[in-house]
Structure formats: C-alpha cells, structure tokens
Image (cartoon, rainbow, N blue to C red):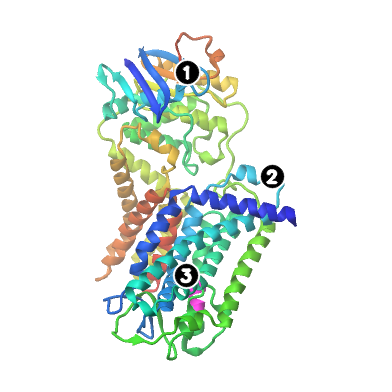
Amino acid sequence: MRDFLSHVRLHATQQIRRHLNSPFVWILAIAGPIGARYMVPEEGADHALISVNNAVLEQSASVIGLQLGVIVAVLFTPLAYIFLRAGPTRIQPRQVTDVVPRSRPALSFGRWLGDTSVLCGLLFILAVAGIALSYFRLPFEDTQPIETLVATMIVAAPAMAVIAAIRNIFIMRPGLRGAGGDVAFFFVWLMGLTLSAAFFMDGTGNNAMADLFGFAAPLATGASEPVHSLAIGGAPITGRIIEFDGMAGVTHPDYLGSRLFWIMVSGLAVFGAGYLFKPGKPKRVKNRQPAHRGPAQFSSERLSPILPKGRGWIVQLVANLRELAKPYWLLALIGAAGFAGLFLPLRGMVGPALALLLIFPMTLYGARWREKSTDAWLGTLPTHTLPRVVVRLLAAILFAVIALLPSILTLQAGQWGDILAIGMGIPIIALGLGYLTRGPVAARLALLILWYGYLNL
Amino acid sequence: MLDLKDVSKKYGRTIILNDITSRFEPGVTVITGPSGVGKSTLLRLCATVEKQSSGVIEWQGSPLRKSPAFRRALGYAPQRIDFPEDLSAIDFMLHVAALKRLPLGSAKAQCLSILDRLGLSRDANKPIATWSGGMRRRLGVAQAFLGSPEVLIFDEPTAELDSDSAQHVNALIFEAAEHAVVLMTTHLESHLSDYDYQTLRLEPPQ
C-alpha cells in the first residue's frame, strides 16, 4: 500500500510539474479571470449566457458562482479535454513507460490526480475572479465570497475530475489514444449534457446522480418556479428576471452526494483502467506491411541535376492534394458521399455525411508539418511560411469543393451557406486550429461539435 | 563559396563559438571537435536556422541572409527531423521538392533516383511510421539532395547507420561535393578514409 501511494504521489507531482512548466497553464490562469466578466453579464445587459424558463437569474453572490461553475461544466469541458489531450502532457515517453514494471493503476490514478488538481487550480482562480466580480456587481452587503467560491467549485470541480478521468482512461487503450478517443469523448460529453438536461425538465425526475456534469440539478432546484427550459451558452433575452437561490441546489444533500459519487466513480474508473492498459504501436502503423528489413539495395547511378524553376505553387498544390487524397479508402468514401449529392439533398443528408468524412483527414492535414523541431528545418527551404500555408489552405478548399461539386451542380436556393461551411469553414478551422495548436485534437473536437449543430439544423 | 569572418555565437553569457574565420569552397569540409564544442551550432548558422551574435557569413561575396536565392542553393539535413509519420517517403520527398520549387515532371524522377541511391526505393510507398531508425536517417539525408543544391549541410549524416549504408551515404555526399560546398559533422571519420576532404577543428572557447 505504501508503495502504491508513493507511486501515485510520484506520478501526480510529475504531472503537475509538467503542467506548471508549460506556458499554457499560465495563459489560462490569466485568461480565466479576464473571461469571467463576460461569463456573467451585468443585469440589464443585452445578452445572457444562462437562462431558466427564458428568464435571466437574479444576481446574488451564489448565483455568480453558480453561473461560472455551470459555464465551465458545460461549455469549457471540451476545452479542458483539449488542454489535457493536446497540452503540455500530450507527449508521454511511452517507449519507456510501456515496458517498465510498475503499477499501471498507480500511474493512471496519479496522473488523474495531477490533472484534476491543475484543472481545479485553474477553476479556483476563476472562482476568485468571480468573488472580485461580485464586489462590482452587487451591493457590498450582499457579497458573500464563500458562497461564490463554494458554488463555483462544487458545480465544476467534479466535472473537471470526470474530464481528467476520461483523458487518463483513454490513454490506457491504443484505440482511444488518438482520433478514436476524441470521437468517444464527443459522444460521452454530448450524452452527459443531453441526459442531464432531459432528466430535470418539467420535474420528471430529480435524481441528481443522473447529472454527470452537475449543471442541471442546481439550475432546476434553485428556481422559484417549476423549470421547463434551460439555456446555456446563448440565452434569449425576454427582459424577465427569475428569483433564484443559488445555494439551494448546490448544497442540497442529494446534489452533494452526487458530486462525491462522480468523483469516486472517476477515481475508481481511472484506477481500474490501469489494469486495462495495453501497450502498442500507434494505430496508424497497425495492420500495415512493415518496411523491408535486412540489407538495403543501393543503386550507383549518378544523380541528374534538377534546378528550381518558377514559383512552384502548382507543384505545391499537387503535393498537398496528394496528402489529402490518402488513405484511398477514405477518399473512396468521400467520393461516394460527394457523388450522392447528384440525387440526394445536401441539407440533412449529403452535407452532414461529407462534413463528417472531411473532418478527419482535414484535421490531420492541418496539423501535419507542424512539429516544433521541424520548424527550423522548414525555414531553410525556399518557400516562406505564409505562401506555404496559403497553398495548403487552397489545396484543402479545392479538395472539399471537388467533393461538393455534384451538390453544387444540383444546388437548391438558400443552400450556399452549407457549401461555404463545408467547402471553406472546415478547411479554415482545421488548418487554423491545427497550425496554432500543432495538433489535430482541438480542431477535430471543435468541428465535431459544430458538425452536431449542423446535423440538427 | 561560403566565407565565415570572425563569427561568434553566444547564448546569454555562454560563448559557444568565438571568432571563427574560414572559407569553404566546393568539396567536403568535415567539422570536428569534442562534443558540445558548437559543431551543430556552426552548421545551423550556415544554414540560416540561427543568426550569429557577431561576425559575417557571406555566400558568393554577399552577406548571407534568409533570402530565397540562398535557400534555393541550400540543402540542409539537421540531426533530427520529425517526419510526418503517416506520409509515405515518396510523398514526403515530393512535398519537400514542391517547397524547393522543383518542376513537377522531373521532381518525382529525382526523388526516386535519390531514394534509389540511398537504398530506400523498395519502401518508398510505405508510411514513414513503418521505417527503421537507419532508414529515417537516410531519408533525412536524401531530402537535402533535392534540387541539386550548391551548398549542402549535413549534421551527423551517418549516425545510426550500419557500415554499408554509411559508405553509400558518404559516396553520394562526395559525388555532390564535386560541384557543391559541403559541410558536415561526423563521429565516424574513419569511414571517410577513401576520400579527400578538408577539416575544420573546433576547440572550446578559452
């Protein structure tokens, strides 16, 4: 037991140190407090992020904390996942850790503790910003720093533990370490939000255990009237203000029990996942014929000189299109979905199918050639960064437009928005986020969320 | 030709290179010296990856800048390249050929020809992820030859290679050196005994 705990402590502190050594955490620590004032609009503002029964919540110390917590638990959980999946701890020395004889449960549990601590630390900073905000928004006698802090932490901290657990569970299985994990996370997140919201509507249920991300129960139980609608993210403004007790839901014993339950489930799941650990090659290598081994065959034919000629953007375009056109099975699927545009409607059928198929190659393409150590070498080539990125973007748009061509030929009025979203929106987001984050995860998750919205249009 | 005049490089207060003056003409110059003496740093300065703290580096009589003209003349193989693992070697080479603005028709032929010389053509269509360390090293060297550069810079081109592969890599480097300025570092100078080359020995700054 002592051995296990010392391993857990080692991995947890190592994980925290890796986070703290990176600028990302500090950027988020600064961005959170700046963003807090936009997350909790003033009373009478022309927008709201949270509404209950189409009414904005009456502001109080606990409501400010509750609003921050709910927004983090709902809207920022994908960002937290991206931070863990693509942030400073994304590179794990697996060649070494996969073969050392140490406790996998201790490793995954320790990393989960480390990730959860860092996310909760960032949440705490946001909560403190909420306290500061309450002094500007409320009469001095109504400020209750403890209530603001408690409301934020109780609502969002368990959600952070859940996100950290999902990330660390996914690391244990080769199939979930890459794109498979991102897709799985998207569905878990979506299911968690949908079930929670549905369960609490119109008083059909009040079991806080069903509230995975912890936003629905406190919003449903703190209102002074039966709740039949919740809006988080973009809420309609009706001018109505609803009386709301922020602490009623947050401190309800059922709710506290449910938060504890989900933290324990997260910890146990991460612990158990340690036993499911499977080392392995990256998925993309699996099932591929390996390169020849043994003595190589060398030619001795002299090289003929070839000199650079012109600006070479056509060659670049072709090279980039070749990158996008692989693997061929995916190209065939994209081609089939695109061809279906000749006889099937774009909205609701061909559009969502094509968009989903394009998300994966585009996000990989967007992040390719962005490894940090490659930058310096690429900088010695005659094509500068900006023209290189522009040609890559043009190739991606061209690829998407070619796939959309049958739909364009049979386009109905009012569907140009769909064409622009798929033909330009996906390439721009995939390359933009891929370029900025040097990885495909952020773009993939953002595009999957947008895709789900498009699917439901 | 490539001229270094009183070139120094400091990182903070640490002096890595101190007043290096040398002239490199077509042919191979092997930069030698103990580990950490600044051999790779000197190559990075010549490849315009980094800028010297003082002194001048000139190419064909003009100060070296990150200009397309010098970049078109340059082939650089650093110690490590993080290859896009899901691409095949031929796609990787074609992409670099495109960035070097080589004509489309002949680029593929040259890519295949270089891969053939370095014993990589059998696996040119397989993803780089399936390649061994030695094959990746040769691929890193191979891309530098694209476009028949006038300046070739290799940082440990034969590290991780077996003796036979190292000989073939060296043969290609020395063939290119008939028309190009070649700078390279190597810990395997014994493999170069069949060739004529110059040596620039770096010593730790006093």
| Foreground disc of the pair 2, 1 | 1
Q: Residues within 10 Å of mark 2 (few under 14, many from 20)?
A: few
Type of the residue with mark 2: Val
Q: Work out whether A348 lies above or below B173.
A: below
> Dot 2 falls on which chain?
A
Mark 2 to mark 1: distance in Å?
39 Å
The crowd level at tag 1 (other Cα within 10 Å; few <14, some 14-19, many 20+) is: some
Residue occupied by mark 1: B204
- The part of the image, by quadrant, that contains residue A69 is bottom left
Question: Residue A181 in the image: x percent, y percent?
Answer: 54, 59
Asked if the stretch drawn in magenta spans residue A191, the answer is: yes
B159 vs A368, left or right, is right
Compared with residue B102, is residue A100 higher up or lower down, i.e. above or below?
below
- Are labels 2 and 1 on one chain? no
The quadrant of the picture occupied by the N terminus of chain A is bottom right
Disc 3 and disc 1 on one polypeptide chain: no
| Residue plotted at (44% across, 62% down) | A125
**Mark 2 sits on what residue?**
A100
Name the kind of residue labelled 3 in the image: Ala
Query: Magenta residues?
Result: A190-196
Q: Can you identify the residue that label 3 sits on?
A: A73
> Which SS class for mark 3?
helix
* Label 3 and label 2 in one chain: yes
Per the model, the C-alpha gap separating discs 3 and 2 is 36 Å
Mark 3 or 1, which is nearer the eye?
A: 1
Label 2, secondary structure: give it: loop
- Residue B147 occupies quadrant: top left
Q: Residues within 10 Å of mark 3 (few under 14, many from 20)?
A: many
Q: Is residue A219 magenta?
A: no
